[in-house]
Image (cartoon, helix red, strand yellow):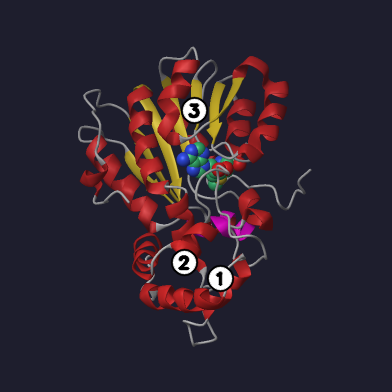
Amino acid sequence: MMSKELAHKPVLINEIIKLTGPKDNETYFDATFGNGGYSKEFLELTNCNIIAIDRDPFVNQIAKEFKKKYGKRFEFFHSKFSKINEVMEKTEEKEIDGFVFDIGVSSMQLDFPERGFSFMKEGPLDMRMGQEGTTAYDVVNSKSHEELADIIYYYGDERNSRRIAQEIETYRKSRKIETTLELAEVIKKCFPNKYYKKHPATKTFQALRIYINNELEELHSGLNHALKYLKKNGNLCVVTFHSLEDRLVKNFLKIASQNDKINKVLKPSKDEIEYNSRSRSAKLRFYEKNNLEFGYVPIENLGFKQS
Ligand SMILES: C[S@@+](CC[C@H](N)C(=O)[O-])C[C@H]1O[C@@H](n2cnc3c(N)ncnc32)[C@H](O)[C@@H]1O
């Protein structure tokens, strides 16, 4: 069982509750169940229903405990954003009162070194949220220097990307890069200054994680599905943790909300940042569906190319 310190603290949850205003018998969709922090808050506050998904099979056990406690009010599917339409077909609901997305890695994923997400703890180079497909090990050890540099630059916004890719290639000539700390050490060599504000591996790890999990395409697909299934006056909350995701959400909602009045952005309070330092870069975007003419928004219209 997970210790209290490791448990994920739901980011911006008070703001989300205030904006969405859940009511008895309404149905909310928690697209990033994780440790169940958001779902729990909704289920405890009102007699509403929750449909939840997560692509990470490690959360299935937590979902089982929720099912025991909340019965018919809670349904969980091991699934991902791009398959929300398939999930909706399996439920009795045709429309949803509100969607919540809390994007990115969970503290549960970061805190377990064997998942390979953290550059602070030794673990295998994995980084797959869904435990399927290409691992970080595959990418780091088999992509060409140019491909690696592009991934690190595009998904990590890392100006030192070419140098890092070069250093990885040089290291690989003598042996494979097997672990998170081994990769972090290779990256560190590209940053001669010993005093950094952020660990030099931060952006490269972010880039690899986003690439491996196809996160931008997933988010784009999830937002399109959410807007399709939202009721009139239904709402959408999206919490992001870095500018790449936030830009995608902002551009998407700008297009989707042509005739809509409400499209807000909120940040955590000083108190929340003090209590949970991981929340410091979080941004919450809120949208209310008044425009029923809304159609599909292609990813190219958001200033992103598909990988
Ligand atoms: C930041 S955590 C959410 C934490 C949750 N709000 C809580 O309070 O415990 C993000 C979760 O979303 C999941 N996730 C990320 N991308 C996903 C996707 N495309 N489809 C489904 N789940 C996804 C991750 O596996 C992770 O468990």
**Residue under circle 1?**
183
Measure how far apart labels 2 and 3 are at the Cα level: 32 Å
Element carrying mark 3: strand
Q: Is residue 65 left or right of residue 160?
A: right
Amino acid type indicated by mark 2 = Thr
The residue nearer to you, when weighing 26 against 65, is 65
| Whether residue 82 is situated above or below residue 174 in the rendered picture | above
The residue nearer to you, when weighing 186 against 144, is 144
* Residue 113 belongs to magenta span: no
* Residue 274 belongs to magenta span: yes
**Residue under circle 3?**
29
Amino acid type indicated by mark 3 = Phe
* Residue shown at 39% from the left, 42% from the top: 219
Q: Is residue 256 left or right of residue 2?
A: left
Residue 86, position in %: x, y?
44, 23
In the rendered structure, which disc, 2 or 3, sits on the residue that comes first in sequence?
3
